[in-house]
Image (cartoon, rainbow, N blue to C red):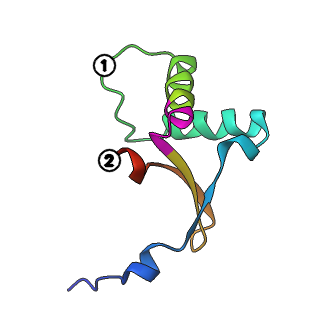
Amino acid sequence: MFEEKSTAQAEQGLDIPYEQLDPETLIRMIQEFVSRDGADWGDAGCTLEDKVVQVMDQLRNKQVKIVFDLQTQTANFIVSPYNQ
């Protein structure tokens, strides 16, 4: 049986403004994100650089945001609640 996490437990993360990250660090984070196993980019034939540009555009347009998970000590890109 699965135990549901409370909202407080599920939301133990910090929003990281992408503008405050070193540009090289941000690019490497995006590259790692778009090249993960299971990343669903379909058969679009996009290059790594194309994918990085797409994610950067989504960050600028506030479609996605970077969240640092305090529990796992990892950063991730998630859909921004302002854009749902």
- Between circles 1 and 2, the one closer to the viewer is 2
Under tag 1, what secondary structure? loop
Q: Residues within 10 Å of mark 2 (few under 14, many from 20)?
A: few
Under tag 2, what secondary structure? loop
Indicate yes or no whether the magenta region holds residue 63.
yes
Relative height, residue 18 to residue 3 (above, below): above
What quarter of the picture does the N terminus occupy?
A: bottom left
The amino acid pointed to by label 1 is: Asp
Q: Give, as a single range, the part of the protein colored magenta.
A: 58-64
Residue occupying the point 74% across, 40% down: 25
Identify the image quadrant of residue 74. Answer: bottom right
User: Circle 1 is placed at which residue position?
Assistant: 43
The amino acid pointed to by label 2 is: Gln
User: Circle 2 is placed at which residue position?
Assistant: 84
> Where is residue 67 drawn, in percent x and y?
56, 57
Name the residue nearer the viewer: 16 or 50. Answer: 16
